[in-house]
């Protein structure tokens, strides 16, 4: 991450990306550019500066023919998953998104709220293009755990992620975030498509759904 400031009137630009060494110098491969604007007053509970997304690189996005690859999850399974999701979210626990960097195998774990769960997908949003989002957009499988830490029970989905430009889902995510005190702009609406689903408990993991063999779907992820 790098910043360019005008110090006599503290405004400027901030870029995010990956630094790479070339010929003894570091170059930043830019993923996002923000306009950084100072807040009025001092409040230790909020950042001093707010950032507005100005530009975002999209060339690394995965491309899917989703209609061709889609296999709906049975409705009885969807009902069970939604029951777990609602109980877990009601207790204040977000889901956990697990991704890996396909270039080096480094894992990344990050909390996300699943705002909609249907036979088609589990919907969650991202406000910045960080490791979780970059990994999900890369050719890499993704797992999401919806887990009740108080009872040590939950569900785990393993599959792949695509993105959508749906304004309805974008608004739904932002409205849900506001109920959690998180007022931010959604830059990615993600749809997680489970190919395998497991029931989790403190004594083990049980597979309860499989759309097809992993060797068939992993090439789509």
Image: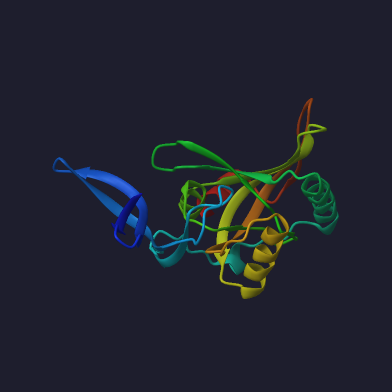
Query: In the rendering, at what x and y percent does residue 176 appear?
Result: 71, 61
Query: In the rendering, at what x and y percent does residue 200 appear?
Result: 76, 35
Compared to residue 122, the image places residue 101 above or below, namely: above
Using residue 218 as the reference point, say whether residue 152 is left or right of it.
Answer: right
Q: Residue at x 75, y 57 (%)?
A: 73
Q: Is residue 71 visible?
A: no
Using residue 1 as the reference point, say whether residue 190 is left or right of it.
Answer: right
Using residue 162 as the reference point, say whether residue 106 is left or right of it.
Answer: left
In this view, the residue in front, 97 or 149, is: 149
Compared to residue 105, the image places residue 125 above or below, namely: below
Q: Residue at x 58, y 61 (%)?
A: 184
Residue lying farthest to the top in this orientation: 203
Query: In the rendering, at what x and y percent does residue 60 appear?
Result: 40, 59
In this view, the residue in front, 20 or 107, is: 20
Q: Residue at x 50, y 47 (%)?
A: 140
Residue lying farthest to the front in this orientation: 41
Q: Is residue 99 visible?
A: yes
By what rule are the colours in the image chosen? rainbow
Q: Residue at x 57, y 46 (%)?
A: 142
Query: In the rendering, at what x and y percent does residue 76 appear?
Result: 86, 54
């Amino acid at each position: 991450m790098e910043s360019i400031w005008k110090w006599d009137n503290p405004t400027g630009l901030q870029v995010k990306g990956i630094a790479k060494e070339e010929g003894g110098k570091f170059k930043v491969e830019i993923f996002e550019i923000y306009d950084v604007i100072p807040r009025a007053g001092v409040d230790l509970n909020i950042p001093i500066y707010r950032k507005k997304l100005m530009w975002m690189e999209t060339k690394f996005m995965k491309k899917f023919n989703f209609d061709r690859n889609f296999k709906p999850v049975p409705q009885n399974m969807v009902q069970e998953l939604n029951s777990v999701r609602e109980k877990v979210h009601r207790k204040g626990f977000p889901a956990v998104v697990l991704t890996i960097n396909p270039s080096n195998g480094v894992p990344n774990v990050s909390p996300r709220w699943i705002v909609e769960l249907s036979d088609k997908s589990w919907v969650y949003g991202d406000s910045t293009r960080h490791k979780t989002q970059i990994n999900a957009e890369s050719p890499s499988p993704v797992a999401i755990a919806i887990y009740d830490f108080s009872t040590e029970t939950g569900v785990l989905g393993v599959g792949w992620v695509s993105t959508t430009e749906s304004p309805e889902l974008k608004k739904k995510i932002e409205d849900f975030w506001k109920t959690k005190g998180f007022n931010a702009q959604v830059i990615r609406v993600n749809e997680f498509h489970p190919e395998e689903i497991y029931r989790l408990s403190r004594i083990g993991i049980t597979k309860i759904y499989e759309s097809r063999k992993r060797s068939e779907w992993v090439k789509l992820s």
